[in-house]
Each structure stands twice: as C-alpha cells, then as structure tokens.
Amino acid sequence: MKVKQLSVFLENKPGTLSRPVQILAQGRVNILTLCLADTSNFGILRLILRDWETAKSLLEAQGFIVKETDILVVEVPNKPGGLADILEVITQAGLNVEYMYGFTVKNENRALLAFRFADPDAAGVALAKAGINTVKASQLFQAMVG
Amino acid sequence: MSNHQSLSSSPRFHPVSAPDFLPGEQLRSLQLHRLKSMVQLAYDHVPLFRSRMEERSLTPAAVRTLSDIELLPFTVKSDLRDTYPFGLFARPMKDIVRLHASSGTTGKPIVVAYTKNDLQVWTNVMTRSFAACGVHEGDIVQNAYGYGLFTGGLGAHYGAEALGATVIPISGGNTQRQLMVMKDFGVTAICCTPSYFLHLLDQAAESGVDLEKLALRAGIFGAEPWTESMRQRIQALSGIKAYDIYGLSEIVGPGVAMECHCQCGPHIFEDYFYPEIIDPQTGKVLQDEEEGELVLTTLSKEAMPMLRYRTRDITALTRQQCECGRSLRRIKRISRRSDDMFIIRGVNVYPSQIESALLKVEGALPHYQIVLSRERDLDIMEVQVEVTPEVFSDTVGALERLQGQLSKSIEITVGLHANVRLVQPRAIQRSEGKAKRVIDQRKL
C-alpha cells in the first residue's frame, strides 16, 4: 500500500520554503502533511498530497526540482509501546529505513508514521506478515477537502 | 579542386578552404611578404608603433625573415585603451567602413576598425571557419551571437552568408523565441557562446523540446573559454557536434582560428594571422607544443594593424598533422586566460580548473559560479553548483555525498578547499553572452 510523496530541493536561505507552498496554494492543491529535512547548506521538503501529479507539474513549471518517491504509512496503535512494537518488527525484518517522520490527520485522532524504506515492496510484505497494516492512499485522503 | 578533395577526409570540400591546405613553404613565403608590408604600414602610420620601434633603433627593414618578428615590441590591451578611441588607426576615416567596440569591463571600451578589404578578409576567414566544420550551402544557421558593437554577431553573419547558408540573424537573448525558431525553421547549425547553449538546452528540456529530434547538428561555440568536458557534456545532452571557434576583436573578431570536423583544436588561419607562443613572465618565444601565452600579428589588416598582440589566452601551438589534411597549425583548446586567473590564499586558480573538477564527478553539473569572499583575513572560495533532476536524491545523505565528491574533486585539482554549495536550478544568473564565472567580493 504505497503512498506517493514528493521531495523538493530547497536552498537554505530565508524565504525558500514559502515559495513552493505559495505555488501550491495558488494552484489550489491541498497538502496533507509536510516535513523538512535540512542541513546548513540545503533542505529537502517532503510533501504528501492527494493531487501529487498536479503539484509536481506546478512546482516543476516554476523551476523546482521535484522527485516522487514511494513511502509506506503506518498507523500507530494508541497504547503504550505501540511505536516500539512497530520499530521492533522493522529491526527484526532487517529493513533499511532511509528516513521516517510522524504526523496526525486532523479530527481523526490517529497517529501516523511515514516510512521511506530502501525497498518499499519488501517492507510492505514484511509488515503485513507481522500483522501491521499500512494505510492506503484512499483512506489517507478520505478526510481531505479540496 | 580534385587534388584538394583527396587531401580532405571531409565529405564536402569548399573551394574557399583552398588556402587551408597551402604547402608549408608557400605559406611561409606568403606570411613573410605580408608581414613586411604590415610592419611598414604600422611604422609609417601609427605613432605608437613607430616610437616603440625607434626606441629599439628598428626600421621596417630589420624584418628580413619570419623569425625577425621577435625583434618587434609587444602590444597589449592597455595600448588600445590609452589610445582610445582612434589612436591606433593606420588609415584615415574615409577608408574605414566599420567600427566595432569591445565591452570594457573596466573603464573605456576598446575600438577596432575595418577597411573594405579588412571586411573581405574577415568574411573569408569566417567562411572558411564554417566550411571547416562542415557547414555548407543549404544549411540554416541560427546566429545567436549578439549583433551590434560586439564582433561575434556580424562576423558570423557575413561568413555564413558568403558560404551560401541561410542566416537567421536572431542575435542573443529571448530563449523561448530561439527555441521556437530552431524548431520551426529547421535550423541545422547554431552560433553562440557555449554557456548560452547550455541555457538553451535547459529551457528546451523544460518546454519539452527534444533537441535530438530536431534538424540541428552543429554548434559553433566561442567567445569564452570552455573545456573539453563541457564539449562532451553538450554533445551528450543535445546530440549535436560542438565546434570551438576562436577570435578576438583586437585582431579581427571571430575567425582567427576554427576547428575542423576532426574536433581536435582550432586551426589558425595563418595566412592572415601570425601566431607565436611566449612565456607570459619573460616574453621569451616558446617552441611548438610548449604551453604559454598566444601572441598574434595581423598579416593583412589595413585599418588597424596589430603587431605581436598579447592575447592573454594560454595555449600551445601544434604542428602535428591533422587528419583533415590542413597545413595550418592548431592551437590547443583555450580553456583559460591569464587574466581570468584569480589568486586565492596565494594559489593561482583558473575557472576552467574548477569546471573540469566539477565535470569529473558523476552526474556532471554544468552551471556553476565561483564566489570569493574574505572572512577575518582569510580567503574563502565558495563554488555554487546548480542541482539537476538527474542528481537530485530525496535523501540528505546522498546530496551531502555529492557535495563532498565535488569538493574533493576541486581539492585534488587545485589543491585548495572549496565550500561547495548546492543551489536551485537557475539560481545562477544566466548570461546571453559570456558567462560570468567568478564573483570576487573580497575587499583588498
């Protein structure tokens, strides 16, 4: 149940984050969540959105470098040790995580984790085997408007 | 011309190229004959040349053989500035039919002049330039060199026209229109600076124009130093052949030297321009194959003869026979100029060294700029490099690795640490003419 994510290259200087966000706002594209990885030199803006194809072409038309990647989104059970259990499965399965970040969906009271695995397909199989379900894109964007 | 046909492995031989194949002995006697008249003209009509020769107790009669040219004093760019605007003209204005001027980066520009004969010679060498790389009648030439005071535009224009090619005098700039014309008019050859062509390639990719599908097959690139790796990059990206043309307005404009279809360095049109290579420090004349500063003497220029002009371009002359059969010597690709050089922490660095270091790294990045600054009395070199879709990875580690590789490659090449900074596409200002590679913010 892979979900598409967009990664955008940003220079690390004041104002660089606002431009892509403005471009998407003007194009009326809604962002489900975003995360920024940064170094002193540059940043990578990661976005999850339903209309990722529209978003990609809007950003590229303005000269941004955009890359689409497959991520897996996992719901964290709302109980103590919920996150630890998931990470344990990943460690046991020897899955290589390139990065991850957490987010919540408004009004749903769910905690979600976005994982970028080196091999998303193998990761999906391993998680399913351990009884951990990944969230489908359609479920993820259900609550979204616009 | 059948005897010439056999000399040339080029599929089409143009009669205008005949002097390119003059036997060495004939070429040298022609050069000597022309050199003597040139020195006489300069001595008789240009006070600066006369006084410099008198200082050395020389008269034109001192030049009896070609190597006697070494007796003559050098001319440098500041001589043109000091005599601004018309001080080096050897003919009255009534004989002068064209003036050009070069952009002066500091102070006044320099002015150059042409008689009718000078323009004919210029057209001749430009025609031979196009013919050398296989451009011919029936070709459609998009001339994106700037028209105006800059010699590039009109020089290429008249050469291509005289050859019988169809010239599109589009001049520089307006990249979208350039692409439209290239596609709709079926352009087969383009003239511009290599950096502007890279910019065109970027724009083509963005607008979804696939250059490989167009009729374009040759690029005549010059007016700024570029490297062999840049040629490879341009050819791989566009599917065209990229040829190096060399010239400077002080001598004539473009058309002093041009690569043939073998692409192994520009042949100097030695029947009109006499080349020497000197040690830039001592002024001593070097042998063929030795690297040094190119010095040129015009052999026919009437309006503004130029004796032993120091070009500041670093290269070497080679006498090795080219496969095309031309007897004209070649210069090694000029990828640096002695005045492009900058000194950082006591080390001499040329932008071309940085360029080749960057292009050595996988996923070569063609757009770069060097920014020099000074922090607490320490020189800092930052190399800004634009990220391309091919090298962009969505993990921080991969981009940092790329940054590290670029930095290491520079360090190996020039022996200095540079901060490599990855920047967004088009963050570096594009030039429609010569690329600005170095920004020096140091206050000395």
Image: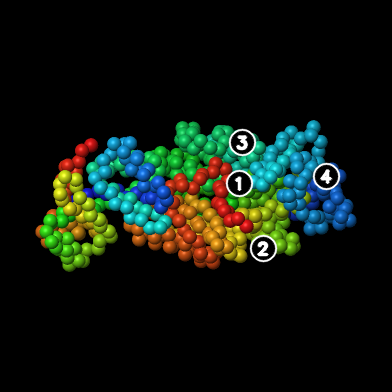
Q: Amino acid type of disc 4?
A: Val
Which of the labelled discs sits on residue B147, or is there none? 3
On the rendered image, what quadrant is the N terminus of chain B found in?
top right
Give the labeled residue for mark 4: B46
**Residue A101 in which image quadrant:** bottom left
Residue at horizontal 62 percent and vertical 51 percent from the top: B266
Pick whichever of labels 3 and 2 is earlier in the sequence. 3
Residues tagged by mark 1 and mark 2 found on one chain of the structure: yes
Q: Can residue B274 be seen by looking at this rendering?
A: no
Callout in the foreground (3, 2): 3
Q: Amino acid type of disc 1?
A: Ala
Contact flag, marks 4 and 1 (Cβ < 8 Å): no
Chain of the residue displaying label 4: B
Q: Amino acid type of disc 3?
A: Tyr
Q: Amino acid type of disc 2?
A: Glu
How far is disc 2 from disc 4 in space, using C-alphas? 32 Å
Contact flag, marks 1 and 2 (Cβ < 8 Å): no
Give the labeled residue for mark 2: B290
What percent of the width, then of the height, locates residue A52?
A: 27, 43
How far is disc 3 from disc 2 in space, using C-alphas? 36 Å
Give the labeled residue for mark 1: B223
